[in-house]
Amino acid sequence: MKWQIRGSSNRKRLLLVLLAHLLLPLLAGCDRLPFSNGSQEVVAAYVAFRTAISAGDVQQAASLMAATRAEEIAADPAAPDKLRFAALMMPGTMTVMGVTIKEGKATLRLREGALVTLAGGSTAPPLGPVPALSSSGVTGTVNLVKERGDWKIDKESWNHDMGANPFQSAAARPFFREGEELPRLLKTIGGKGESQMRGSVALTPDGTSLVTAGYGDYTVSRWSVAEGREMASVKMEHRPTAVALTPDGSTAITLDAYGGVTFWPLTPEGFGTPERTGSVGQCHDIAISRDGRYLATASFDKFVAVWDIAARKEIARATMPTPMRSVVFSPSGQLLAAGSGHNSFTLWDLETGAGRTYTIPKVDAKSDVSGIAFSPDGKRLATTHMDSSITLWDVTTQKEVKNFFVSGSSSWSVRFSPDGVLFATATQGGNIHLWDAQSGNKLGVLQGQPSQPQGLAFSADGSLLFSAGEQGEVAVWGKE
């Protein structure tokens, strides 16, 4: 259990690397204190300090700091202005991830945002906990010292991690806004007629190349986006079923029909020497955590597994009562979601290993969760189904927001745009549908791909959408 501290501001703010002790998140209250052995006193001192900063009370803030720091504040005529600037930069919620106390010194570990508490549904088999799970966003440490029996703030360091992908902008370009002209088909790449990619397409972080897995022709291929040419193609012994890229763009990872996991180093020319290792059963989907440390697989052999990518080994597994069809990590790294071969999905808290399974209403009991995706802020979860259903969920409450369908057309996959405004679904009818990420309302339909679209991938800046067709082509959609 972690302790969450909430402030009053919910505005979206520019996030920077914050190193000075005054440029800190607003921490104005608390809702639980799980720590013991003096930790509560440490956290309480920090909350009092944050409250003083949010109120712009220089004198009170200085009284809560170590003596040397208090002297610096007292001697700085610009301190009030710095406090006001700090208040403008503060996110609304921080979570205390841990407290360490030793010999009159204490350290707080903090993360922006609130942790999700899983409730409702039914108890799922445990998965993990996953060791040393890391997350993106604002993280920091606060060092305190004990002076005259009281904890005082000594030093703080903060960092804003934009994620493992250096090409991901904090302000992604909109793919589409309601009322605008719909994006159009700009071009198609590849198309052998027999690839049957089954949705297996991944885009390098810099947007310059694609990696595709051809179930029908056993190939893993690398394509130049600008030139539309095939850079490299390797014939596999077993049919590839899924492909994903590490966030730094250094490695492609594929699954095959015999349960093998293959690691493909990416080179300027195409691929380095592949490394096939382990067995993950009859798997249909693969996901990689945003920090690039872990991969997860969903298996029709009734299990979900998490692997340590660097160690090339499985570190956690949950044996499930039903076949598993799809899988995705939350952006924060706290949650893993997996869709089943029936009308249900499971959420696991990877920091505890606990999970809950949620039955999806109004969906056929035997309808696969063919696709599952989190919104970029982790607050929404979308699912697609073989009976044509599409659902949208509030992750914080684990409540369904909307349940709808595309008439007579199975929905294969789903992806949110990087700016979080919309999500796209690929349907058996040959079209790509765009939906509002908050309400689930329909925004538009993209038409014209040569064959049935199955897999989807947005460019990192959100300006382009790539859709993998059943006959091996990748369509590129945008406004350019």
Image (cartoon, grey):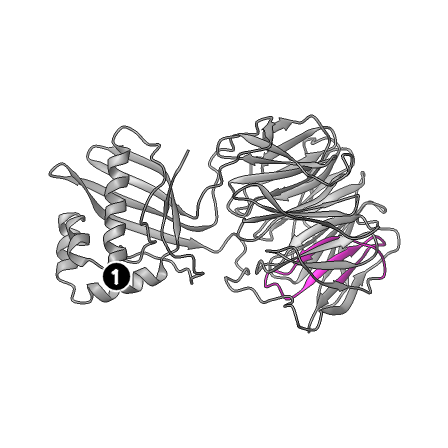
Determine whether 352 is above or below 361 in the image: above
Residue at image mark 1: 83
- Where, quadrant-wise, is the C terminus in this rendering? bottom right
* Placement of 109 over or under 450, stated as above or below: above
Q: Position of residue 418 (x, y in %)?
A: 59, 59
Which residue appears at 80% of the width and 49% of the height? 197
In terms of image quadrants, where is residue 363?
top right
Where residue 189 appears, as percent x and y from the top left, is 78, 62
Q: Quadrant of the N terminus?
A: top left
Q: Which residues are magenta?
A: 450-475
Q: Is residue 101 left or right of residue 379?
A: left
Q: Residue furthest left?
A: 148
Q: Quadrant of residue 97?
A: top left
Query: Any magenta on residue 433?
Result: no
Residue 58 vs residue 133, the one in the foreground: 58
As for residue 457 lying within the magenta part, the answer is: yes
Determine crowd level at label 1: few under 14, some 14-19, many 20+ residues with C-alpha closer than 10 A.
Answer: many
Q: Amino acid at mark 1?
A: Leu
Estimate the x, y position of residue 137 in percent, counting from the top left: 45, 52
Q: Nearer the viewer, residue 148 or 232?
A: 148
User: In the image shown, does 375 or 266 lie closer to the viewer?
Assistant: 375
Residue 28 placed where, x, y %? 31, 49
Q: Residue at horizontal 33%, vertical 35%? A: 33
Left or right: 102 in relation to 479? left
